Amino acid sequence: MTSPSADPAERAAELRAQIAFHNERYHTLDDPEISDADYDELVRELRALEAEHPDLIVPDSPTQLVGGAIGATFAPVEHRVPMTSLDNAMDAAELRAWADRVAKGLDGEPATFVCELKFDGLAMSLRYEDGVFVQAATRGDGRIGEDVTANVATIRDVPHRLAVPASTGEVPPVVEVRGEVYMPTSSFERLNERAVAAGERPFVNPRNSAAGSLRQKDPAVTASRELSFWAYQLGEVVGGPEFSSHAATLDWVGELGFPVNDHVRTFDSIDDVAEHCLHWQEHRHDLDYEIDGVVTKVDDPAQRELLGFTSRAPRWAIAYKFPPEERTTTLLDIQVSVGRTGRATPFAVLEPVFVGGSTVGMATLHNEEQVAVKDVRPGDTVIVRKAGDVIPEVVGPVLSARPRTSTPWVFPADCPACGNPLVKPEGEADTRCVAPDCPAQRNQKIAYFASRGAMDIEGLGEQMVEKLTSAGLIKDAADLYSLTVEQLVELDRVGQTSAQNLVDAIGASTRRPLPKFLTALGVRHFGPAATAALANEFHTVDAIMEKSTEELAAVEGVGDVIANTIAQWFAQDVNRALIERFRAAGVDFGDPEAAAVAAEARAQTPQTLEGTTVVVTGTLPGYTREAAEEAITSRGGKSPGSVSKKTTALVVGDSPGASKLTKAETLGVPILGADEFEHLLSTGELPDAT
Ligand code: IVH
């Protein structure tokens, strides 16, 4: 790759060439090589250069044009009213700057703003003559688009004949309605499920699949693609009514029979507009269609007239763009990591890219099949997506940018950490390293032991674990407790203070509560809920170790599968030996006194509720919620938080929960009051049904 030129004239020429190339890919070939955000960045750079050096502006600079050339397959259509683009605001400050320009253009006269969602699809102009649909044209370069009438005619949202609006009583001889053709997210997901099932490459996003669907030679294919349409603007209208506002125009367009989006809002202040934009930035995924911003338009047609157009966009509208959730970048390599359970996961090493609010340099590729379905290869330009809090994902390759020498990526046969053969059990998606002494598994187990949800040892992340194991200082988590400051300072880039801090942090971890220690052991399925339930019931590691599968499974919140894995884990000599080493290191194994008291209390208390499940709702006289539950469990019963078919009785105190009561009534579960509860505790008997 050549580096960008430092000479402004050369750089402007470079940018113009790149933008023209990407316009062609996007508008004509429907096969963009870079994300919208990357494209916008090129245009912004060119615009900034031109602002600084106005002599560099040439009439056919992409900053002066809407963008997009005409494809070969569809007949050209000249737009009688040009289809312009929109200027963008990337943040609230740019939005306010636009409002200032509007105010200036209107000599300080206040404006009302109409906000619409910015649908991420394809702009379309639909022409009706004497109320009959005659032509659909894409935007193209804004002046000349493409005739896609036959395909658009298959979209259900597009009326073939206009309805007569009640407000005006007639349909004008010529009406052009403009809006966005899009593919609902749910339809996109269905389409991709079908594509994958048929062994075809999935589409990268709903916009691309909508574009691809409109480019079909056979309208029957378009018809099968579940496209939709939102109307948001008028083009040429001959003999139509005069409108007093954009909002009124949209109402009329709705009366003609077009879908107009529900989320159109009118505001008098730009602060409210900014707040509305931020609201949709947060809620963009609540919708069944993709939006990439909010379009704000001046409501009054007379004010629009006053403001007019620049060479490419109206001054009376602005698109507030959300931060990009998709970017294009280079896939530098595909590597495989091995987790603590031996699972081998392929992941993408990326040229770092800022997307979805953070810089992404790595993304999981899940498993072998996912890599094959996406067919991503080292060296590819790939689309990276990070939506909201969702973890970053490689959507797919940009095929047109693929190096000619590239070959499909092959899952390694051997574990990258220990060199032993990887195995992929028949019918399973995951590939695993099953070598018991695999260093990657060992390191991951130790890092998990030290992690926040477990022993929470500050300063002991994956990198430190790697240093410690490769220096031969530790082989498992129990070895951590004999590390010394003298040993640690010998390690690369570990000073006296951080060594001391680490030793202190390891020492402090011996006092973690029992559930944390149980979690840290990393037994499969043994998550926070089950560890808390067992610690609560049995109080010490020793008590838990001695329990049978049945005794473990009897504890509320511990299922049969977990109980079985735990019992098996504690039955193995290696694990028992590990436990003894933790004991020797001084790790807190729970409170034997509490265990003894609980055991004693159990022995003293008649097990009247053995085998029953009693749910409590509301406040019972003389009991806190915990005490009421304890009264049940200490008598051998269970006391879960919700009513089910298995519930023996529901005990109702003051201010009970309505849903528990209704559910108990529906299921025919006996409902007891405070006195009947006392009777149940002492005898285990339910009152006679009345
Ligand atoms: S109005 C003269 N309204 O955004 C005003 N455009 O970046 C023309 N778009 O080409 C456009 N939602 O494809 C308008 N509610 C909306 C829109 C919208 C999406 C698209 C449209 C346009 C592009 C400009």
Image (cartoon, rainbow, N blue to C red):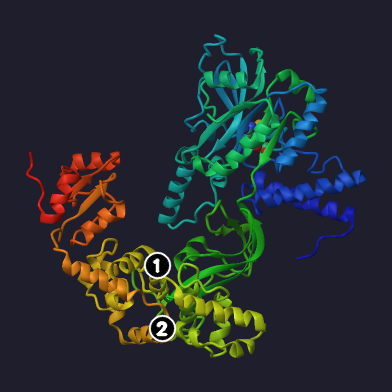
- In the figure, 405 relative to 34: above or below? below
Left-right relation of 422 to 47: left
Q: Residue at x 80, y 64 (%)?
A: 3
Image quadrant of ligand 1 equals top right
Residue 60 % position (x, y): 82, 41
Left-right relation of 473 to 176: left
In the rendered image, the residue lying farthest to the right is 55
Residue 190 % position (x, y): 43, 47
Count numbered badges in the picture.
2
Quadrant containing the C terminus in the rendered view: top left
Let me know if residue 339 appears in the view. Answer: no
* Amino acid at circle 1: Ala
Q: Nearer the viewer, residue 520 or 163?
A: 520
Q: Residue at x 54, y 54 (%)?
A: 389
**Sequence-first disc among 1 and 2:** 1
**Residue under label 2:** 582
Residue 681 % position (x, y): 16, 54
Is label 2 in a helix, a strand or a loop? helix
- In the figure, 598 relative to 162: above or below? below
Left-right relation of 55 to 21: right
Disc 2: residue Cβ within 8 A of ligand 1's nearest atom:
no
**Residue under label 1:** 429
Neighbour tally class for label 2: few under 14, some 14-19, many 20 plus, Cα within 10 Å: many
Q: Residue at x 28, y 55 (%)?
A: 627
Left-right relation of 598 to 251: left
Mark sitting on residue 52: none
Circles 1, 2 touching at the beta carbon (< 8 Å): no
In the rendered image, the residue lying farthest to the front is 622
Let me know if residue 551 appears in the view. Answer: yes
Q: Nearer the viewer, residue 594 or 169?
A: 594
